[in-house]
Image (cartoon, rainbow, N blue to C red):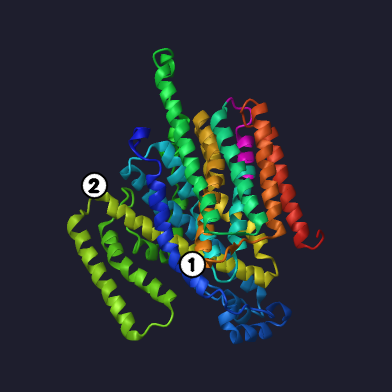
């Protein structure tokens, strides 16, 4: 990814572009949710013990009890596997793992690739790209899960809130602790100014969120004020980066030995991409991965045939032509599925329009691209199309994941909040754990700086954009009445433990010379394990 002068582009340009795209994508879903908000709830299901009775109840109350995803997991479990619950639970677990994989794979392969290309096309400085595009790429699962839960008509906004807070808590404690353990005794130190900036701003954000939760409701302006803190954070990062660069240029004649040193923050986007990737030449691994790729094919083709991809490593002209041809039809199908009752004649008209648009785009792609390499000019429309389609796919998968978690909670008599704090938070944060620990181990001093910065910049982004943007959309949908914010004791407990973990790092790390070590890691891990034990005891009814 190319870098440029920090003053050459506005730090607000890319965030505005991406957030407007997310707004256009989700507004329709929020409007539909608002229209369906008065629907009948599924009462009485928990009072039934026999699976046949539950199955009959679900069929009789299909409109009220059916989850909002594409699959009715409750009917699948009780009607198809009610007498064989082990198979039913195994199938739900498999679906859960599959959806986590699809969400992470879509974000990492398609979504992040589009973001990286757009960053170069917009000539963003690496520091700004790091706190905007990289954070959006890493936090896509949390952001989409939050948007889905707040736009749902089933009243599961607390699931999205719990998922974001649970993920932020996991990353800022467990991931930071893991980094501290693997580099314990190392001479690598974290930049004090960047650490204090991120941690103090994060604490300020959580204080603002606490105020929203205590108030119990928020209007459009309150939600937008919380969301706009993200732009304040981007400006703060840009200002510090610009000030640091200006001072380093003044010091070059005096301290020439530091002239070739690059600001660690400017490597936030491209450092990991430059690390060599190892591949095993073992025949066993070769056939194993071939087998895995064969199993992935049914999951791979639908996305590959509808998401334009102009990256060098995955360029294929036939797939590209197919994606721009089929994506309009795919969008028409999704829109018709959400619209409700549409006559056959109207469906045919919409499909004809989608087919015509797809045919025109396919012909243009066929004529203007080569088989050997992706296009080099006019990349922005390609990248924007890939970004939009990857956003839509991520949103659909996140919606199915939230629907599945709610169904599992209903079946296992576990609060969806508990699943959001644990299962969803762990699944969405697993990539952060692997990537940040690997960066700290193999990236040297700069790698430690990047890894620790990512453990705070990512949760900041998820909280402000994931929750903030969701609050804005929910407030718009409930206007003119304020949006009622979920108020659950577990949410306040998580928020309190999260603040406690941040305060521990804020006190310990400066006292340890800004060098992450076991003292920092053990304290953070103890805080997280205490939280898990408390949630377990509350779930078992041993603690009220």
Relative side of 416 to 63, left or right? right
Q: Please provide the residue range marked out in magenta.
A: 174-187
Report which residue position mark 1 lands on.
Answer: 30
Relative side of 317 to 56, left or right? left
Could you tell me which residue is drawn at 55 percent across and 63 percent down? 150
Check if residue 346 falls in the magenta segment: no
Residue 331 percent across, percent down from the top left: 36, 69
Label 1: few (<14), some or many (≥20) within 10 Å? Answer: many
Q: Would you say residue 90 is visible in this rendering? A: no
Residue at the extreme top of the image, as rendered? 254
Report which residue position mark 2 lands on.
Answer: 376
Could you tell me which residue is drawn at 41 percent across and 24 percent down? 246
Q: Quadrant of the C terminus?
A: bottom right
Count of marks overlaid on the render: 2
Question: Does dot 2 land on a helix, a strand or a loop?
Answer: loop
Q: Is residue 332 above or below residue 232?
A: below
């Amino acid at each position: 990814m190319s870098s440029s002068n920090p003053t050459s582009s506005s730090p607000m340009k890319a965030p505005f572009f991406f957030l407007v795209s997310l707004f256009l994508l989700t507004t329709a879903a929020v409007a539909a949710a608002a229209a369906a908000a008065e629907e009948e709830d599924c009462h009485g299901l928990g009072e039934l013990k026999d699976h046949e009775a539950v199955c009959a109840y679900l069929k009789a109350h299909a409109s009220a009890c059916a989850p909002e995803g594409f699959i009715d997991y409750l009917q699948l479990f009780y009607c198809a596997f009610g007498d064989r619950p082990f198979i039913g639970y195994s199938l739900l677990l498999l679906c859960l793992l599959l959806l986590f994989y699809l969400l992470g794979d879509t974000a990492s392969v398609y979504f992040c690739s589009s973001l990286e290309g757009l960053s170069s096309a917009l000539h963003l400085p690496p520091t700004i790209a790091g706190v905007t595009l990289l954070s959006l790429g890493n936090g896509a699962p949390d952001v989409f899960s939050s948007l889905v839960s707040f736009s749902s008509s089933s009243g599961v906004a607390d699931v999205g809130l719990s998922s974001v807070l649970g993920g932020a808590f996991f990353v800022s404690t467990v991931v930071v602790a893991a980094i501290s353990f693997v580099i314990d005794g190392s001479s690598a130190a974290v930049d004090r100014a960047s650490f204090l900036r991120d941690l103090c701003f994060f604490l300020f954000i959580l204080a603002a969120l606490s105020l929203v939760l205590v108030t119990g409701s928020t209007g459009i302006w309150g939600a937008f004020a919380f969301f706009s803190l993200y732009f304040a954070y981007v400006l703060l990062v840009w200002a510090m980066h610009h000030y640091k660069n200006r001072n380093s240029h003044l010091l070059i004649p005096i301290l020439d030995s530091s002239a070739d040193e690059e600001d660690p923050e400017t490597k936030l986007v491209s450092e990991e991409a430059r690390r060599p990737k190892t591949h095993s030449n073992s025949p066993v691994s070769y056939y194993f991965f071939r087998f895995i790729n064969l199993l992935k094919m049914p999951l791979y083709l639908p996305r590959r045939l509808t998401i334009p991809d102009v990256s060098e490593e995955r360029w294929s002209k036939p797939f590209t032509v197919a994606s721009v041809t089929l994506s309009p039809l795919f969008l028409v199908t999704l829109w018709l599925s959400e619209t409700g009752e549409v006559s056959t004649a109207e469906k045919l008209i919409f499909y004809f329009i989608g087919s015509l648009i797809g045919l025109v785009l396919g012909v243009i792609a066929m004529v203007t691209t080569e088989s050997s390499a992706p296009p080099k000019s006019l990349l922005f429309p390609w990248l924007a199309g890939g970004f939009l389609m990857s956003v839509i796919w991520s949103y659909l998968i996140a919606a199915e994941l939230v629907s599945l978690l709610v169904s599992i909670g209903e079946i296992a008599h576990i609060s969806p909040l508990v699943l959001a704090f644990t299962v969803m938070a762990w699944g969405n944060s697993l990539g952060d754990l692997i990537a940040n620990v690997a960066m700290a181990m193999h990236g040297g001093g700069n790698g430690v700086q990047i890894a620790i910065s990512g453990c705070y910049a990512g949760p900041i982004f998820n909280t402000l954009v994931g929750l903030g943007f969701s609050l804005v959309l929910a407030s718009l949908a409930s206007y003119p009445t304020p949006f009622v914010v979920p108020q659950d004791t577990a949410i306040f407990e998580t928020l309190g433990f999260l603040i406690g973990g941040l305060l521990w790092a804020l006190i310990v790390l400066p006292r340890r010379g800004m060098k992450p070590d076991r003292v920092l890691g053990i304290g953070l891990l103890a805080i997280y394990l205490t939280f898990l034990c408390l949630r377990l005891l509350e779930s078992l009814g041993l603690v009220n």
